[in-house]
Image (tube, grey):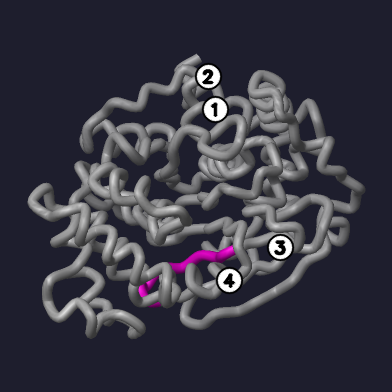
Amino acid sequence: MHETQEKMFNRDLSYQESYSIMKRLASPDASDRDRIALLSMIHQKGVTATEMAGFSAAIRDFALISPVDGVSDIVGTGGDLMNTINVSTAAAITASSMGIRIAKHGNRAVTGKIGSADFLSRLGYRFDFKREELLEKINKNNFAFLLAPQFNGTFRMFSEARKQLPYKTVFNYLGPVTNPADPECIIIGSSELSMVPVFAGVLKESGKRGAVVISSNGMDEVSPFCRSKIMFVDERVTEVEIEPENITGRSIDIHDVASSDPEKNFNMTLSGLRGEDKKIAGFIALNVAPLLVARDVHSRLNDAYEDALETIMSGRAAIQVNKIGGR
């Protein structure tokens, strides 16, 4: 960051600048002072899609696992404090049972009660594996989970700098776009409306397909009880708003799909995946639907929802849960 640092304030960085700066600051030789300078600059002016794309590409370069062809991810930023079931993981498992190759990127709970890794850990999933095993898992079950801290040390390199700042930094938003497997299609859930077009821009600049979703109450997922915005990204960006009852045909309340008790939350998620609780199953299917549309499996969200729900109610998602957990 020494290079005429003042000149970088109050202006947006190019992709190459963003990439190069992150590569330099993620090195063990960089100082926390320079890391803080970058994080402060980005916070003061606001991050752009171009900067996020450059940062994420640099971070993936440091990952211990290289990209995997043909995979997808469903991932949220977290931070909505709603304590809903771990729907992104449940939706990813369901999608994998439908033949979509999933490389799920995630972590343990930070703001919620049970994160993706917490849920899978309770299933008996083993997180320590190498690239060869990653490919084996995906080829065998269409599913693998990459625990973020295990495969990417860049976030650790910035941990001290982040602790010294009294606000969220760009690293609070980089998780969904730094999957080391580098999925070609990503469904990103955002809990902040201002980040929706930024994430959409990252997907577009990175040549990916996918969608960015946010609910009107700030949930980082497609809500089963209030309006949601979905920004689809392929060659162009298309924005749609949906009322969940027009797709699910039923009334679902937040208390039907959320719990502050980790054990209950885990069991609720399982109950939905097994088709035992149709409201939770509907919530999961609602969050599989954007991926099916983004991957051109279906052209309409209603059809995608029905397909995902039928997959759950038929028992295929439950069988996939057992395979993934080694049960």
Q: Determine the residue positioned at 53% across, 58% down.
A: 188
Residue under pointer 2: 122
- Residue density around tag 2, few if under 14, some if 14–19, many if 20 or more, within 10 Å: few
Q: Who's the residue at 58% across and 48% down the image?
A: 79
Amino acid beneath label 2 = Arg
Q: Residue at x 25, y 55 (%)?
A: 60
Tell me: 129 left or right of 303.
left
Residue 119, disc:
1
Residue 37 belongs to magenta span: no
Q: Amino acid at mark 3?
A: Leu
The amino acid sitting under disc 4 is Ser
| Dots 2, 4 in contact, CB < 8 A | no
Mark 4, other Cα within 10 Å: few <14 / some 14–19 / many ≥20: few
Classify residue 265 as left or right of residue 120: right
Q: Secondary structure at mark 4?
A: helix
The residue that disc 3 covers is 301
Gap in Å between the C-alphas at discs 2 and 4? 34 Å
Please state the horizontal and vertical placement of residue 36, each as a whole percent of the image: 28, 59
- For the record, the magenta segment spans 205-212
- The image quadrant where one finds the N terminus is bottom left
Which residue is the site of mark 4? 194
